[in-house]
Amino acid sequence: MTARLPMSDSARESIYEAIASIRLIDPHTHINPHAAGSTTLADLLGYHYYTELAHSAGMPKDQIEEPGIQPRELVRRLVENLSPLENTAQYRWLVEICRMFFGFDGDRIDASNWESLYETAESQMASAEWAQIVLDQSNVEAVFLTNDFDDDLAGFDTDTYIPCLRTDDLVFHLAKPEVRQRLAGCSGIELDGSLSSLRASLRQRFEHFVGRGARACAISLPPSFEPTRVSDGRASTALDQVLKRGLLADDAHKQSLSRRIFWTLAELCDEFGLPFDLMIGVNRGVYAGGVYQGQDLYDSRVSLIQYRELFNAFPGVKFPISVLASVTNQELVSYAWIFPNVITNGHWWYSNTPSFIARDTAARLEAVPQTKQIGYYSDAYKLEFVWPKFDMYRNVLSDILADHFVHKCGWSEERAIELGRRVLRDNVDEIFPRRTTASTTDPDEPTASAVRVDPLADTWADDSAAGLDDEPGSETVAMDWGSKAAAAAAAAAAAAVGMGLGMAKPDSDELDDLEEVDESEEVDDGEPFDSNPVETLFEEKDSFDTVAIGDADQTDDDLFEVPESIGEDPASDDLPDRPTLVESDSGDDSVAITDVNDTIRITDDDDDDGLGSVVAFIDEDDVSEDEADQNATVVIVSDSDDEEATLDPSPSEDEIQLVEVADVELSGAGPSRAAIDSDAIKDELDTEPLDLGNMFGDDDDSGDENNGDDPAPKIQMLRSEDSFEPDEDSLQLTPDPTTGELTFQVGDDDDDELSLEPESPVRVQPNAPSPANEDLEITLEIPADDEEFEGFTASDDDSDD
C-alpha cells in the first residue's frame, strides 16, 4: 500500500515539478561567453564562495593564491579544508553539481574520492559542446552577461549570451587614466573637457550595446552613494579637474562627476529603453587581508531614500533593485509597493541562502504586485552553478506556494504554478524585452540597429521593420525634416493640435511631391526612432512654448529674436527623424491647412501641457514664390519675455563665453535703482576727525573754552537742576546707523534718581550744582539695620575706593 502524502506535501511536489520544467533565462551572471563552462574542478572550487569560506575557516591565504599553482594541486588543498563547510548551502551546490553532471553518487567530497572525481570531470569538460550540454541539462535557454563598457561583444551568440552594459568603471573610476583611455579607444571620442564630449562617448556605448542585443544596463553601488542632479557648471568644473589632476583631484570633484555620469546613464537608459539594474549596498575592501573577491561586505546603514530623486525623475525607466542584505528587503518591498518603476530583483550575495530567501520571497509575494518581481538570478561565474542555485530557489518557492497560497489561501495548484512561472520566467521576458536584432556571432557581419517604436511601450523593431533598411543599393522614401515631405507631415502634425484625437494628413498631391533620398546619406541607423517626435520636442524643450513651421532658408533669427539656449541636452538639440501627430486637450475645433508651404505658428494655451491650441497662418502673400519652393523647417521658439527661462542657472565658463557677454548680469523683478558710484561716496566723506574733547573731566585744562590753537570747541557737561550724572553705561559711544558718527546713548527715562536694588531701597540724590572741576558730594540713604552697606562711600573722583 502506497503511503499518501499530506495535502501540502503533495501540492509542493506537484508545484516543484511544474516550475522545474520551465526553461529559464538567468537575468544576471558573470559568465565569460568565450569560456562559459569549466575545464577542471579547480574552476568550480575556485569560486570565491569556497575560497573565502575556506580562508574564514582557517586556510591560509597564500595556500589559495600561490602564484603558479596548478589546478590539481589547488583542488587537493581546498578539499582538505572543505570539512568545516559541509553545513553550508554553498557546499550543497558543489555536491549537486557533481551529481548532476559527473555521475557522483556520494554526499561528501574528501580525500578518498576527489581524485577520481577530478579525472571524470576533466574528461567530460573537454568536450567542445560542454557549455551547451550544461545549458541543456540545466534547462536554461540564455544567460545575461556582465560586460565591461569597452567589450566589443564579438565572437559569441548574443541570443544565448545576452549582453549587459556594466558601468561601474565609468561612474566611479573615470579619474584613472587607463579608464579614460579605454573609453576613448572604444568610442572613438576623446574627452576634451566639455560635457558634450562626455555625453557623446557614453551615448556611443549605448548605441554599440543596444545594436548588439543588450537588454540592460547595470551597476554596483556603495552605501554612501546618492544619485542626484548635478548642474552643468558644477559638472564642467569637476570634469576639468578630473581630466587635469586624475586621481589627485579633490574627492568633491570626483563625487560630483560620478553623480553626473550616473544621471547621464539614467537619461540614456530612458532614451534607449534599457532597464537600469541597481545593486545597492556593497562596501568594497572591508577585509583587506581577504582572498580575491572575499573582502567586501554589506552595510545596513544604506537606505533607498537616497534614490528617491532618481525614481521620481525617471518614471519611464525600470529599476530592478538588488539589495546586498536581507535586512534591507522590507524597505525594498515598500518601494516596489509604491513606485511603479521599482522592481524587486533576486537574492544577492549574503542574502542568497535558503532561510533569507524564504523570508524575503514570502514578504515580496505577499506585498508586491506579481508583475514586478524577478524571482532569482544565479550571479554565477561558470555555467555549472546556474542549475544548483536556481534549484535552491525553486525548492523554497515551492514550499511558499504550497503552504501559503494553496493550503492557507485556498488557491488551486494550477494558479500557484502560474504565479511561480510569472516570477521565474514571464517577468524576465517582459521587464527585459528581447530586441529584434541580429545575433552578433560574426563581428564583421552588419546588423540592423534596434530602434524604439514607441517611447512609452516595450516594443522594439529593427530598421528594416521600420522601413529604413531595404536591400543594399535600393532607394527609400525618407521622411526628412529638410524636405517638402517633412513640411507636409509637420503641417499635418500642427493641424492636429486643437483637434483632440483627430488627425490631419497631406493629400495625395502633396505626397506626390515627396523626394526620394539615398538612405546611406539621410538615415542614421544608430539613432533610436521616436514615433512621436513633435511631442518629444515639447517634453525635452520644456522651456519653449511655441512651434513655428517656416521656410528652410529663414534662420531662427529671421523669424524670431530669441537668445540661443545654453545648457540643453545635446541629444535633444537635433530635430527628430520623423514627424507624427500630437494630441491636444484644447478643444475639438479643427484647422484647415491649405498649402504645405504655409508658415504655421502654434502658441501656448497656458495649461502646462506644452501643447498649443491656437494655430495662426502667416499670409501667403508675404511669402515669395521662390521662398515657397524651399524646404520647410521646424523652429522652436519661446513666446515668453523671460529670457531667464532658457538659461542655465549655473552656466559653465564655456557656456558664458558662448553667449558672448562681457560679464554676468543680475536682474530682478523689483524696481530699478541708480547704480552706486564709489567716487561719489568718497566726495561725501568728511576727512576731518571728530574732536570729542575731554569727556571725563580729568584734564587740568578741561575748563578752558579754547585750548591753544585747537579750533574745535570743547564738550562741557551741563550743570543745572535737570542735569544728570553720567554713569559708565551712559558714556558708551555708539555709531549712528545712517551716518556712522559716534553718539551717546539717549535714554527715555526722565528720572534722575538712581536706584540700587534688589533688597533695601538705596536712594542717591545729587546735591546742588557745583563747578565742573569740584568734587560732587553724594548722599546715600541706607537703613540702619542693613549691615551689607556699612563703610560704603561714593565720590566722583578717580580713586579706587
Image (cartoon, rainbow, N blue to C red):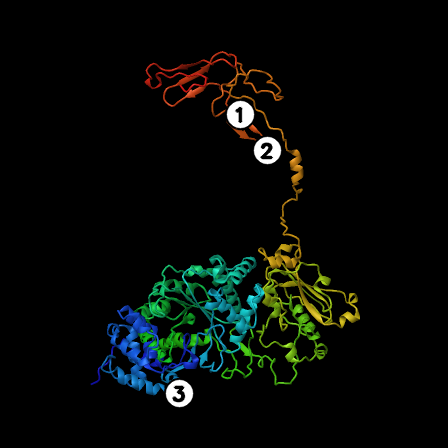
Q: x, y (%) of residue 78?
A: 28, 76
Q: Earlier in the sequence, mark 3 or mark 2?
A: 3
Q: Nearer the viewer, residue 196 or 530?
A: 196
Q: In the rendering, at what x and y percent does residue 268 appear?
A: 53, 68
Q: Quadrant of residue 17?
A: bottom left
Secondary structure at badge 3 equals: loop
Q: Secondary structure at mark 2?
A: loop
Q: Give the residue type at disc 2.
A: Thr
The front one of 87 and 534 is 87
Marks 1 and 2 close (CB-CB < 8 Å): no
Amino acid type indicated by mark 1 = Val
Q: CA distance from mark 3 to mark 1?
A: 102 Å
Q: Label 2: which residue?
A: 738
Q: Position of residue 169 (x, y in %)?
A: 46, 68
User: Which badge, 3 or 1, is on the more N-terminal residue?
Assistant: 3
Residue identified by numbered label 1: 746
Amino acid type for the residue under numbered disc 3: Glu
Q: Is residue 356 left or right of residue 764?
A: left
Q: For residue 476, what is the image quadrant?
A: bottom right
